[in-house]
Image (tube, rainbow, N blue to C red):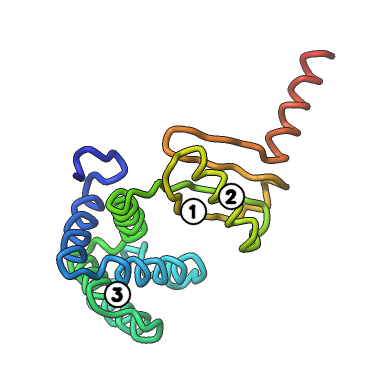
Amino acid sequence: MAAEDPSVSGVSGRYATALFELARDEKSVDAVKADLDKFNALLDESADLKRLVRSPVFGAETQLKALNAVLDKAGIGGVAANVLRVLTKNRRLFAVADVIRAFNALVAKYKGEATADVVVAEPLSDKNLDALKASLKTVTGKDVALNVKVDPAIIGGLVVKLGSRMIDSSLRTKLNSIKHAMKEAG
């Protein structure tokens, strides 16, 4: 399965595949995904956690102690916590975001879902998220999981990447194309 999917390759792909197979065998795919998503959210929110994960300055023991404290506080346990500890012990914690991304791709494929990366200028309401999911489902014929990132630099609108397709309706892109057209006309 990992060899067919280009997003699930390399070191992160091997860890994600092993984790997925273990979670599937234990019938805990949803629980593991929820825990990994929670850890990923913590990673996005905390500069200190990012530094701990990415910096080669910290030794494996120091990383493990800090990671255990984070996992306990966040209530992350079981298979997800164990794989995070294995990544730490093997000095691969820096790849955790890629492992989570690859794991989520495997889960989506397993469930027959498509995954769309969405960039918005400000957080979407649940109503708008549901409308976007419904629109994407009519296009793909599959349930679509959304990875939403907020980037105020796009000013307004949204950018949706679904597989090899990308729809950029951001205000920044529209303004840039107007600016480009004005330069050519002048």
| Badge 1: residue crowd in 10 Å (few <14, some 14–19, many ≥20) | some
The residue at the point 59 percent across, 42 percent down is: 159
Task: Quarter of the image for the N terminus: give it.
Answer: top left
13 or 112: nearer the eye?
Answer: 112
Q: Position of residue 88 (x, y in %)?
A: 24, 69
Residue 132 marker: 2
The residue at the point 24 percent across, 61 percent down is: 92
Specify the amino acid type for callout 2: Leu
Residue that mark 1 sits on: 146
In this view, 94 is above or below 74: above
The residue at the point 23 percent across, 50 percent down is: 13
42 or 132: nearer the eye?
Answer: 132
Task: Quarter of the image for the C terminus: give it.
Answer: top right
Left/right of residue 5 with respect to residue 123 in the rendered view: left
Callout 1 secondary element: strand
Is disc 1 in contact with disc 2, using a CB cutoff of under 8 Å?
A: yes
